[in-house]
Amino acid sequence: MIEFDHVTRTYGPKTAVADLSLAIPRGELFALLGPNGAGKTTSIKMLVGLLHPSKGSLRICGHDVVTNPREAHLHVGYVPDEPCLYDKLTGREFLWFIADMFGMPRHLAGSRIDREIASFELAEFADDLSESYSLGMKQRLVFAASLLHDPDVLVLDEPMVGLDPRSVRIVKDLLAARTRDGMTVFMSTHTLAMAEEMADRVGIMVRGRLRFLGTVMELREQVALEATSLEQLYLELTSAAGVDS
Amino acid sequence: MNRPVPVGESVRLISLDEESRLFLRLRIALVWQAVRAMVTGSRLRLSLVAMLSGLFWAALYGLFHEAFNFLDVLHADVIPLLFNAFFSSLMVMLIFSTGILLYAGLYCSPESRLLLTLPVRAETIFGHKFREAMWFSSWGFVLLGSPMLVAYGVIRGAAWPFYLLLLPFMLAFVVIPAAVGGICCMLLVGWLPRLRLHLLTAGVTLACLAVLWFGWTLLTEPKADAMSAAWFERAFARLRITEQKLLPSWWLASGLLEAAQTSRTGGVDGTALAEAVKFLSLLVANALMLQVVAGWLARVAYRRGASHLAGEVPARRRRRPGWFDRLLVGTAASPGRPLRLLLVKDLRIFRRDISQWSQFLIFFGLLGLYFVNLRSFNYHNTYASMIGFLNLAVVGLILSTFTTRFVYPMISLEGRRFWILGLLPVDRDQIVWSKFLFSFVGGVVPCSLLVFLSDCMLGLPWSLIAIHEFCCLLLCAGLSGIAVGLGARMPDLRESSPAKISSGFGGTLCLVLSSLFIMLVVVTAAVPTHLFLLSRTLGPALVATDGLLAVAGGPWGTAASLAVVGLAGIAATVVPLALGLRAFRKLEA
């Protein structure tokens, strides 16, 4: 579903992502971890077409993100770290705009909008202008919009920021259910507990390079320390000594 | 490599027409909601804006009516030249303003980042942002150009086709510079990202040099023949450069001049009308062609340019406190230190925000250049006094735009950082006072220098210079008081954009009150002074020997007017500041 093929991205003299090769199959929930400035957000921005790779190629469902962006985007839902909405549209109007953008038939769009409004418990404020929403409400609306067209790939950049515990639970349950149905999730997060709980595989990036790729169990075996929690393993792997070794 | 996965039946790529309709619906919904919110929530602001726009339009119409009336009788042949100069200047301004607005809209806005992640064509996103930028950059042209053209039509006795063609002419014209601005913007971002800053710097430098050269040529002209026929000839000869037949501004000017032609009986002149339609067709064809080119370029370059720009990292620059900052902060335990620390903070932000100091520099620089050129004219003493007061009003008006745009939002912007200031051991009043001092000192230095320069160039006596400087001091204090006081009284703590804060109700009110205050100060001070000078020049009998005019034109009148000006200045400073301080003490972030 997602293929990074020797992808490198530079910012002037600085290499943000170096020779990243990664394939994520259908139905997998992949969590990308790493300290600030490791290259996680750059990888996500390349995945959704906001940045082009300096070298290498990136495909979603077989479509090159640079040469066929529209075809690739048709398969993707994206939840950015800072939700962007139209202040002067209501939540429902925003969902209709997204549904129309994906060319969804009217009857189907209507039922899907109702479905997502119910799933994310938006009914109470769906007809208010989004300028009056709190950060958590905006985030829930963006989640609803990203899942409206049942995407094959869902890209999440720090998805739990601003969500209350109940909304976090809703999102976790939804992600689990959707991945069981075959949706691929690519998620960047600093919440290690969530990655440990939900991810099929984790990738740990440090200074633009993928330092580890595998399951949490494999990470434990590789680091072979007394450390038992993902937090301890992560800190060991991303510490200066860990990076240098 | 895996083969592309087909999409499900629930989604599809929509056609270009469907995209266009979708974005049109989006635009209508956004405008409708904005208008509805304005009508229901800010009726006073809407009424004020409508009333002031109407007044502005009517005043411009009157001004242009008088000007065309004068020119039509004496110098009718000059009108095409003036049209060409006016429209070509506007064309250049529209290219720059649309280019800058598109740069912000296409490459720096959260909306464009959202749209770039959706299955929408790059050219549709461009079209959506292009129409928005074109509207924002050209509404001023319609507001400024329509009274001028209507006044011209009325003076020429133009028939109905002239008025019918006005809007199509203007709309077709604005698309051309807007599209050129858009094309330049995409080319610069897409292919010459590293050259962008250098080109911008070179462009601004060239423009400044051109203005300086023009000013210098006027300055070095012999004083004796200023405003004479030969002087006008030379001035017009410089403007002939705008009469290029390949410029859209020439097509617009020629088309409108043809459309205003009438037959001998005063009816529609068929031949001239056909010529006008030909020029309109030329404008429409070029506007459409440039839109096609811009759309094609967006398809090829927009996503690539957005990626280029998103990948640029700002250069890291170490900043050290300047000597002035160190001087202002002074010793650690000296009294008033928190106030001075707040001032230094605002000063640093001002210095490091190019949008603030560059506008400040451009407007006051141009004003200075104009004042330097005043020496080219030999004024009668009373005219010189009048022009001195008008210049004082202009300085005040420009300062009021700065206080509204930059000073008024300062307290609101502090609201977002209120947790920092709120937890500091600083009296809240000091925050408000620091903004006032920052605005007052920042305004009074350049304004008093400019007024002094203007008065010296006009050769005014010291007594008048002192009056002008007194008024200028009060204007700076009053305008700062209004902006800071209203900013503290009506803060918008949720908004992060100073432009949006200043364009809200509070900002509009600030601008209106500032304008009224300037008018009050200048008119109150100018009338007695003018009457006094008239009585000295023409003799008391020709002005008034008794009654109110005689008193007003005497020394007591001047003294009384200055007292009124002083009271108005104190009131404009103290009342809004007191209201603002009281509100700010109770403010809850």
Image (spheres, coloured by chain):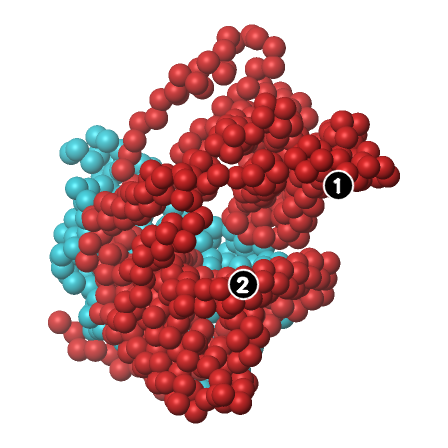
Chain colours: A cyan, B red
Callout 2, which amino acid?
Phe
Closer to the camera, B241 or B51? B241
| Front residue of this view, candidates B490 and B496 | B490
Q: Which residue is mark 2?
A: B70
* Badge 2 density bin: few <14, some 14–19, many ≥20, Cα 10 Å: few
Is residue B255 rendered to the left or right of residue B149?
Answer: left
Amino acid identity at mark 1: Val
- Of B88 and A201, nearer the camera is B88
Tags 1 and 2 both on a single chain: yes
| Residue farthest toward the bottom in the current orientation of the protein | B270
Asked whether the beta carbons under mark 1 and mark 2 sit within 8 Å of each other, the answer is no
Name the foreground residue: B157 vs A130: B157
**Residue B364: x percent and y percent?**
46, 38
Q: Could you tell me which quadrant the C terminus of chain B lies in?
A: top right
Q: Is residue A2 visible?
A: no
The residue under the point 62% across, 53% down is B504
Q: Identify the image quadrant of residue A35.
A: top left
Q: Secondary structure at mark 2?
A: helix
Residue at left 24%, top 56%?
B188
> Residue A222: percent from the left, percent from the top?
20, 44
Q: Position of residue A10 (x, y in %)?
A: 19, 48
Is A65 situated above or below B209? below
Q: Residue furthest right?
A: B547
Q: Chain of mark 1?
A: B
The answer, for residue A84, to whether it is visible in the render is yes
Q: Which mark is residue B543?
A: 1
Q: From the image, which quarter does the N terminus of chain B lie in?
A: bottom left
Q: Is residue B535 above or below residue A204?
A: above
Instruction: Please tell me in which quadrant of the rendered image residue A50 appears.
Output: bottom left
Q: Is residue B21 above or below residue A121?
A: below
